[in-house]
């Protein structure tokens, strides 16, 4: 079996990816069950004293090179300090005229009780926060902050990694460019990226890539040392050895991928992060700008974001579109509220209503179910890198490993944003607690 370096393994864990195979998630669950995992209070990074002191004690120093930065519970520190471990590029915020959310706190939210999908025992609010290893959560109702707390590590002015929530930002930029007529979702990827003509993506449409219904011979099974995810990670690894001879960057790696024999594009949903890198390349080809510039120009500055965000970048300076965005929780709440209001904040249009409609509905539930990856998410679909619940409230969301989330409920006029550092990465374990909690909050707010 090919020996995998600790560095590359941890880079993979950091850069992806919550759509793991059944074998992977089973292994993750078994490993967690057989180990003693610190609970939320015990693993609070404020108590662990990582990287504190001048210099810190050697047993409190975390590193990307040896992988220690992403071992739990060190993960709980690292999610708030990712740019200290990897090269990054800023997403510039508004320098003045910040948008300020009004606040009307509702302490009764803390009395909400709900029953998780995987249990018959009701869970209270504090148990919900602890079960998800919540670092920070904001709940908006009708544009006002009704609840906000930072239980561990994160501060109101802090920056936290969003993991695969980053994909939904890439999908939003693509939707803006589609609405503007700069991208035709029905054209083949090869039209925009000739370099991918002979790859798996050459004859896939932009829409098929955005909906992750492509046929790509690539897996994100961490238990398989030959899985594509390892080569993908290595292509973006800033710490790879001098004798490395593989693809130099993410884009070179994409060109090596081929279709699954006997499977055509559009047959079923299969969550694969490489699709997001393709779209990141498309939007940069069309605009001649990086995704960091595009988010700043089309969302962050016009939205009135107060804090610079940043993207991790590969050795060629290419931003990791699939999971590299770190940002402020309050700014993410403003983004969610803007999306809930069809692109507007107050009377000011940040992005067009047509762009929001590009991703907030749609996707094929049949193709989603055929993929078989998320049996608990019955009736859901996936569209433009957003998760569509298709429930009676028409809720939709952005999701990332270890508990990152933007949940938008148009009927309840509610937005929930959360940063977390759950020791379990896959949302297959996080959804049974989180989704019914979000629905319970919506029901409570609708009764107000």
Image (cartoon, rainbow, N blue to C red):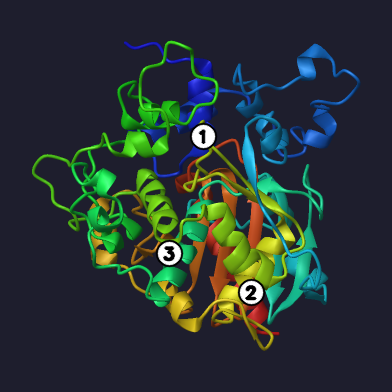
In the structure shown, which secondary structural element does the residue marked by tag 3 occupy?
helix
In the structure shown, which secondary structural element does the residue marked by tag 2 occupy?
helix
Nearer the observer, 214 or 177: 177
- Which residue reaches farthest right? 54
Say few, some or many: other residues with alpha carbon within 10 Å of mark 2 (under 14 / 14 to 19 / 20 or more): many
Q: Which residue is mark 3?
A: 174
Residue at left 28%, top 38%?
255
Vertical relation: 125 (above or below) 248: below
Label 2 with label 3: CB-CB less than 8 Å:
no
Q: Which mark lies nearer to you, 2 or 3? A: 3
Image quarter where the C terminus lies is: bottom right
In the structure shown, which secondary structural element does the residue marked by tag 1 occupy?
loop
Label 1 with label 3: CB-CB less than 8 Å:
no
Vertical relation: 87 (above or below) 241: below
Q: Earlier in the sequence, mark 1 or mark 2?
A: 1
Q: Position of residue 337 (x, y in %)?
A: 64, 74
Is residue 39 visible in the rendered structure shown here? no
Q: Which residue is mark 1?
A: 314
Q: CA–CA distance between discs 1 and 2?
A: 31 Å
Vertical relation: 299 (above or below) 261: below
- Which residue reaches farthest bottom? 347
Mark sitting on residue 337: 2
Q: CA–CA distance between discs 2 and 3?
A: 19 Å
């Amino acid at each position: 079996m090919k020996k995998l370096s600790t560095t590359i393994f941890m880079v993979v864990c950091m850069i992806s990816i919550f759509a793991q195979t059944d074998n992977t998630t089973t292994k993750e669950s078994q490993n967690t069950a057989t180990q003693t995992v610190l609970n939320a209070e015990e693993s609070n990074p404020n108590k662990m004293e990582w990287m504190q002191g001048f210099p810190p004690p050697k047993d409190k120093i975390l590193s990307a090179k040896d992988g220690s930065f992403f071992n739990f519970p060190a993960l709980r520190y690292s999610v708030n300090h990712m740019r200290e471990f990897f090269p990054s590029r800023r997403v510039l915020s508004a320098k003045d005229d910040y948008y300020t959310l009004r606040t009307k706190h509702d302490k009764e939210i803390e009395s909400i009780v709900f029953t998780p999908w995987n249990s018959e025992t009701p869970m209270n609010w504090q148990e919900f926060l602890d079960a998800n290893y919540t670092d920070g959560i904001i709940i908006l109702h009708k544009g006002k902050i009704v609840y906000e707390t930072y239980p561990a590590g994160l501060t109101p002015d802090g920056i936290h990694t969003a993991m695969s929530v980053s994909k939904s930002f890439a999908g939003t930029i693509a939707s803006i460019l589609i609405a503007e007529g700069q991208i035709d979702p029905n054209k083949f990827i090869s039209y925009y990226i000739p370099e991918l003509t002979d790859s798996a993506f050459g004859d896939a449409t932009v829409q098929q890539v955005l909906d992750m219904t492509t046929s790509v011979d690539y897996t994100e099974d961490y238990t398989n040392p030959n899985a594509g995810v390892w080569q993908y990670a290595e292509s973006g690894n800033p710490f790879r050895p001098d004798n490395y001879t593989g693809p130099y960057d993410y884009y070179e790696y994409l060109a090596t991928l081929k279709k699954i024999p006997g499977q055509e594009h559009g047959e079923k949903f299969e969550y694969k992060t490489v699709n997001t890198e393709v779209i990141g390349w498309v939007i940069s080809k069309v605009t001649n700008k990086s995704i960091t510039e595009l988010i700043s120009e089309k969302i962050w500055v016009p939205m009135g974001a107060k804090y610079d965000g940043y993207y991790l970048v590969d050795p060629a300076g290419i931003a990791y579109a699939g999971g590299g965005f770190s940002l402020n929780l309050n700014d993410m709440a403003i983004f969610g509220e803007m999306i809930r209001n069809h692109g507007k904040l107050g009377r000011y249009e940040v992005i067009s209503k047509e762009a929001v409609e590009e991703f907030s509905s749609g996707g094929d539930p049949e193709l989603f179910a055929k993929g078989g990856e998320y049996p608990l998410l019955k009736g859901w679909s996936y569209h433009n890198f957003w998760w569509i619940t298709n429930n009676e409230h028409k809720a939709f969301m952005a999701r990332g490993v270890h508990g990152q989330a933007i949940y938008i409920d148009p009927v309840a006029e509610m937005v929930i944003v959360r940063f977390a550092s759950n020791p379990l990465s896959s949302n297959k374990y996080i959804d049974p607690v989180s989704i019914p909690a979000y629905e319970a909050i919506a029901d409570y707010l609708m009764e107000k």
